Amino acid sequence: MTGPVDAALSADEAVTARAPAKVNVHLSVGPLRDDGFHELRTVYLAVSLVDTVTVRPGDGLALSVSGEGAHAATGPDRVPTDARNLAWRAAELLATHAGVPADAHIAIDKAVPAAAGLAGGSADAAATLVALDRLWGTRASRDDLAGLAARLGSDVPFALVGGVALGTGRGERLSPVLARGPWHWALGIAGEGLSTPAVYAELDRLRAGGRGAGRPAGGEESVLAALRGGPSSALGAALANDLQAPATSLRPDLRRALRAAREAGAVAALVSGSGPTVAALAEDADDAVRLAAALAGEGVFRTVRAVHGPVPGARVVA
């Protein structure tokens, strides 16, 4: 607990917060650790595709979802509205930390598709933390929130801070990175969502079979240099993701999606995180819009968005 709790807002008041999706412009996966996680070195870039979370006073916890994934019946695309949702767990964790009742209605308006390798669930959790901190008057410090975020998941701390950062450990230990920016992208989500644990399991299977030996995580120097100084061709040449091979192994259609992005004129393209999002790097904002339109017409992607980054992390907006 961080100190005396301010008076909660009245029953008719609400707090709205937003948090961004991320693209891993570099993701190096080391061997499996004793704790069941892989050692990672990843360079996160927060992009302008955001989820919006509105919290109101309530009696106990309740959660509703609109937008992307709200109506999926089954599978990884489905966004749960109970304790399986990371935002629900964020609310419980903050309430326990602050010693306040976990009373709130959490309404998530999703623009970030679920199970897409964009950390949409992590964005929801980060936005919930900052919104409920304001609603409940818990006055948590940024360090407090970062510690709670790390307990919730590997990507939640970055969703909290945004910008560009080097993530180590399982991705939760962050070092800020200076970036020239902005960098422009077309994000294409190919087919249904992919389970992150399934992609890591496929990586382990491929490595056990000699298809890409386990190696120390690292090698991010070229992408960091490109982010600092450009041009886009240098960043494109430096993009790397160890999870691309297992993602395309599980979903061979991703190879066609990557090829479509390159043939449409992308500077470079890679699978973001565990997929199935393909992040296509553009020269500038106009080129990102053109690229997104070209990809939308290919019939390969179910959703295409032109985005830019870096953008700030989770923040209260109303």
Image: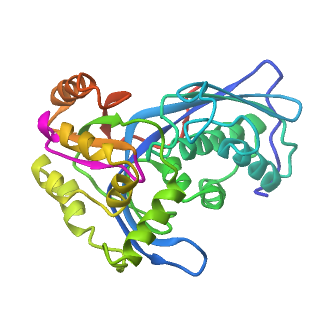
**x 19%, y 62%: residue:** 225
Residue 304 position in % (x across, y down): 33, 28
Nearer the observer, 299 or 128: 299
Q: Is residue 197 something one can see in this rendering?
A: yes
Residue lying furthest top in this view?
A: 12
Question: x%, y% of residue 165?
Answer: 38, 58
Instruction: Specify the segment rendered in magenta.
Output: 262-275
Is 47 above or below relative to 54? below
Q: Does the magenta stretch include residue 230?
A: no
**Res. 173 visible in picture:** no
Count of labels shown?
0
Residue displayed at 48% across by 35% down: 113
Image coloring type: rainbow
Please report the residue visible at 57 percent of the width from the left and 43 percent of the height from the top.
121
Q: In this view, does 66 lie to the left or right of 166?
A: right
Query: Residue 129 or 190: which is nearer the viewer?
Result: 190
The relative height of residue 24 versus residue 259 in the rendered view (above or below) is: below
Closest to the observer, 200 or 15: 200
Is 217 left or right of 229, judged from the image as shown? right
Q: State the image coordinates of residue 117 (x, y, percent, origin top left).
A: 44, 47
- Where, quadrant-wise, is the C terminus in this rendering? top right
Q: Quadrant of the N terminus?
A: bottom right
Is 161 placed left or right of 236 in the picture? right
Q: Where is residue 267 shown, x and y percent of the image?
A: 13, 43
